[in-house]
Image (cartoon, grey):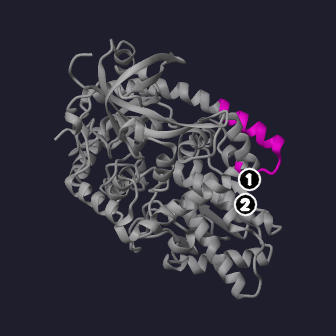
Amino acid sequence: MAFLGVSESLSGRRWIGPSIEVERAADALVQGSGLPRALCQVLARRGVLPTEVNGFLAPTLRDLLPDPRLLKDMEKAAARFRVAVERREKIAIFADYDVDGAASAALLIVWLREMGREATLYVPDRIDEGYGPNVPAMRDLAAHHDLIICVDCGTLSHAAIAAAESADVIVLDHHMGGETLPPALAIVNPNRQDESGELGYFCAAGVVFLMLVELHRQMREAGNPPEPDLMGLLDLVALATVADVAPLIGANRALVRQGLVVMGRRERSGLVALSDVARMDSAPSTYHLGFLLGPRVNAGGRIGQADLGARLLTTQSPSEAAALAERLDTLNSDRREIENAVRAAAQEQAESRGLDGPLVWAAGEAWHPGVVGIVAARLKEAANRPAIVIGFDDGIGKGSGRSVAGIDLGAAIQRLSGEGLLVKGGGHKMAAGLTVTRENLEPAMARLGELLARQGAGAAGPRDLRLDGALMPGAAQVGLIQQIEQAGPFGAAASAPRFALPDMTIRHARRVGENHLKLSLSDGMGASIDAIAFGAFDGPIGPALSNHGGARFHFAGRLEINSWQGRQRVQLRLDDAASAGGPP
């Protein structure tokens, strides 16, 4: 049954409210904790029991961080790294070109620097070398180094790691493993096939952090307590966790929450400079990491110089940081232009094919490989289905996919590769990459759709908007929003709470910027709230609300605290609206 009777909103979506089971669980939480119902509705949706409330609202690494030794090869990897540090061996770090790879490399480089050691950074070019270790690069690194550490890559790189025969290789990764592992000294990966999968929610930076925790344990036991402060590195872990869309569950909640605190101190030159060019004017949040900082760090690997992100995160020079941040900001603007062109073509193609199947996909000639993943994410959001976008060059297509909650895209891609329909492919639950020939494109996508359908892809309505409940503007106070934020951080597998404000009138509406809409809303009983609808004029919401004619509406979105000149006010970040019926 549609929530508030909204079966088709202004944007064409059906609103879905909490289930009967969630409502009952929220009632139990209210009775057991005395907390506001709005907060209890969020906790109930996340499956928090009355006995777990206090621990959930105050997550700590002490309570949530697992013993690193639960992961296979962890002790061996940490021990070998310790030997390399103690003997002053030459260490190379081979990192992926995205945020997770950059942050993972930065964790090791910064830690080594604090120990008075240096390391060689190698980041492959996305277009010339592709994802992961390659034979020429690994062979060359092995000729000049004693130890190579592959971060956010390497689990499927059999030939490349075999080519590094004159050096030891450690892999710290989280991508789905195959039936056999490459000949590395140690492969630490919670998504190896011989792992339980319980820690599969960690991104690569999380795995690197766990390795450093184990390293510190070994060094203390050996009577050589290390100097670096691991907690001071959590800003890098938080950035990678959010930007790589890792689920914000388990220890990730504590890692990100503490990482945001560390980032707020503005002690890392690269992140300070990047925050400034991104015009961040408030305390860092998961929104800033995912939508302001992450895309800029990614921009170098997508369309520019692959190692710019890692260099930014490791530099100690404010002037170098400022220059790198400006360069990445410019590249990010260029990326947006390229993305917009590919997105328009992909959207048209996908819509003509249909958005109601288990898989949404599009492929085109010369689509830039650096933006296909972002466009896939946009298609996924529009259709609420896994999406694949592929760019072809000389008959070979390189694509990227994004998934929805509950659908393991990486496993499906890996199976497709094993069946011979792909040149190669791999990834993790929420994101994956692939290479396919033009002849195999149609059969590969058809088969992928079958595999995803078996997991339940396509069962959900393509435009459903899920809400945690209804709230009147008089109850939407700063204190309540601060309490609700304690149930975060919010992100992948922990969506931000959305509430409906029912039966409201529009006091003022004005267009801001090119396509945004600012609103002042009233419940008719003296209570009011401001709202902002970003991109409202890209669709039907902007025109409908700006020409409201005094009509009443239900509004839905995320409540946030807007700070301006030392004052705090609650604001609704509007996602959707629907007619409340009746005369104005």
For image coordinates 34% across by 19% down, the residue present is 540
Q: Is residue 556 above or below residue 579?
A: below
In the image, residue 11 lies in the stretch drawn in magenta: no
**What residue occupies the far front of the structure in this picture?**
525
Whole-percent x, y for residue 22 in the image: 26, 56
Query: Which residue is denoted by mark 1 in the rendering?
Result: 314
Whole-percent x, y for residue 90 in the image: 77, 68
Query: Which residue is denoted by mark 2 in the rendering?
Result: 109
For the residue marked with disc 1, what is the amino acid? Thr
How packed is label 2: few (under 14 Cα within 10 Å), some, or many (20 or more)? Answer: many
Residue 76 tag number: none
Element on which disc 2 rests: helix
Is residue 157 visible in the rendered structure shown here?
Answer: no
How packed is label 1: few (under 14 Cα within 10 Å), some, or many (20 or more)? Answer: many
Contact check, label 2 and label 1, Cβ < 8 Å: yes
For image coordinates 49% across by 68% down, the residue present is 189
Main SS, magenta residues: helix
Q: Is residue 535 above or below residue 386?
A: above
Q: Is residue 275 above or below residue 65?
A: above
**What residue occupies the far left of the structure in this picture?**
1
Residues rendered magenta in the picture: 313-330
**What residue occupies the far bottom of the structure in this picture?**
222
Looking at the rendered image, the quarter that the C terminus falls into is top left
Is residue 75 visible in the rendered structure shown here?
Answer: yes
Looking at the rendered image, the quarter that the N terminus falls into is top left
Q: Is residue 144 above or below residue 523?
A: below
In the image, residue 323 lies in the stretch drawn in magenta: yes
For image coordinates 69% across by 43% down, the residue present is 308
For image coordinates 38% across by 55% down, the residue present is 429
